[in-house]
Image (spheres, grey):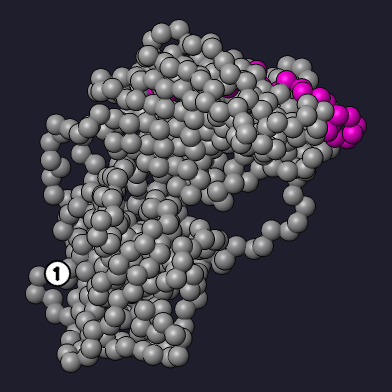
Amino acid sequence: MNSFTRLITVLIAAGCFAAPAHAQVTIDNDLLVTDIGYWEVEILSGGESRDAWLTALGTPSGTTFEREEIVFNLYSYVDVGGGGFQLSSTNDVSGPALVNDGPGPDVVTSSGWFPGDAGQRIDWAATSSIDDGSLEITNTFEFTAPPGELLGQLRLYQYLDEDVLGSFDDVFFTRGSSAGGNLELFTVDDAEAIGISHGGGLDVSQGLVNATFLGWAACTYNAQKPAIVAGIQTVSLAGDICTELNDAAFSHPVVGDAFGPRDIVSVMAWEAARAAHATITTSTGGVPEPPPTESVPDPPPADSVPDPYLSYGIKKPKGEPEFDKFDVFLADQFQAGMFTVEKRDSLSNPVDKNGEGISDPDTHLVGYKVKQFKPRGAPKKPKEPIEGIEIRDQFFPDGIVVNVDDINKADRLLVPASKSLTEPPAPLGGHNLDHYLCYKAKLPKGAEFPEDIQIELTDQFIDPDGIGVTQWFDLKKPKRLCNPVDKNDEGIKHEENHLMCYGVKRPKGDPKQEQPLVYLHDQFGGVEEWETKKEKELCVPAEKTLR
């Protein structure tokens, strides 16, 4: 058996206070116990587990290990401030209850509630299921605040301790990455390389709704539980490996670069946004593949710059549900802090300017209206202007000076996205584009802007049939300066590449363009249909210098 499979159980919830419930329901994939790939999990309340069994083929011996116990402890600790506690210890826990035992998937549910950071009641419901013949168990967790209230501060630490063919001979390694959307942490037996992975949803396309993946850590037994309970466990997107485990790095003959053998535990962490509701869908099961042997393509050149982008207003069709606000952490050259994402408000297409072509026609930018997060009762921040910012771009190679009135009023977050005019698009593939945080910008008092700059543009809206249609525009004064921004500690690819956004207007007498419906897919919004409005701004690559 050589397929990646996952132990992904993201449980955003918690409680305090009763002893953990120990009722359990066992479900499986209805294969025979003797079949390679047989997968059986004992489900506790909240989708936790203290036992799971796997039938797998050992490597290199070729021995079949029938219904081998894999999981020792799979626990979910939640910290709403002051230290972590288990989901299974929350209030009024109901279940686990078996609601379907075939035909079709085996399904188990449980529910309960816990007090949030401000004492508000947070309800949770968990559904776990295994399809017939599937190598995965799927877990869906719903977390809901009372009407008019938010989930508040809520961090989930998912703790896994595997004991595979013994307790002290585990080997730890990783596959994939958080940036690539395929991160998995594996713990397997040193001699036979059987085991399962620890992972979770990394973005909205993998089930995260109003939640953010923070990172992971690995160490030896009994190092992480006390740290989680004390509220001092650290994680990072690159992974925090403790000294004892890091000192045991070696090359394993089957899995490649690894750590061990030791009694190893791992933890992954997520943070819920300050929203009214959060959903996480996860999966579990299987054994790892050998290390990859194919060459990895070279990344795009580090000095590449983004295309120009023509920005359009967008709106939801009538009758569609309202946008569910959430929070993200943003850091750029001007500031760092939490921001509330309030709604989608623009779409920027890569655009061919003056016949220069488009380098990446597949990567678009969806604009979200954002507002600096302000805790309840906190005083209003004083105005913080930045004046005399020198911008060099294609229109002003010798420089133009702009001012930002107040960095505390950043109002737009640009997020890379895929787009289609005909059907829901696939998630965006590999690209070289950053996220951007945008600030309203204007010329210094008394400065004049040239009135004779015209540009010839074409994009998929102007030329939907690809027959060479173009449109002239008058370039207007600067509207926004957009900095590359680090979102939720994901990093910045090109710190030197900014976007300067100018107003644009069709010459007087030119007909308006028919605005199409579009399907958009990005990290935050999933796949949705939107109505487009007229052109608003042209954003071009720029270099920025603070005087």
Reply above or below: 331 against 143: below
Residue 410 in the image: state x and y as whole percent.
Answer: 24, 54
Point out the stretch of residues depicted in magenta. Answer: 57-79
Nearer the observer, 232 or 288: 288
Residue 538 in sight from this viewpoint: no
What residue do we see at 12% from left, 40% from top? 380
Outermost residue toward the left? 446
Nearer the observer, 228 or 511: 511
Residue 276 in sight from this viewpoint: yes
Q: Which residue is the site of mark 1?
A: 444
Residue 394 in the image: state x and y as whole percent.
Answer: 35, 80
Residue type of the residue flagged with mark 1: Pro
Asked if the stretch drawn in magenta spans residue 59, the answer is yes
Q: Is residue 464 left or right of residue 48?
A: left
What residue do we see at 17% from left, 32% from top? 376
Reply above or below: 397 against 251: below
Q: Is residue 345 left or right of residue 112?
A: left
What residue do we see at 39% from left, 20% from top? 112
Figure quadrant of residue 178: top right
Dominant secondary structure, magenta:
strand
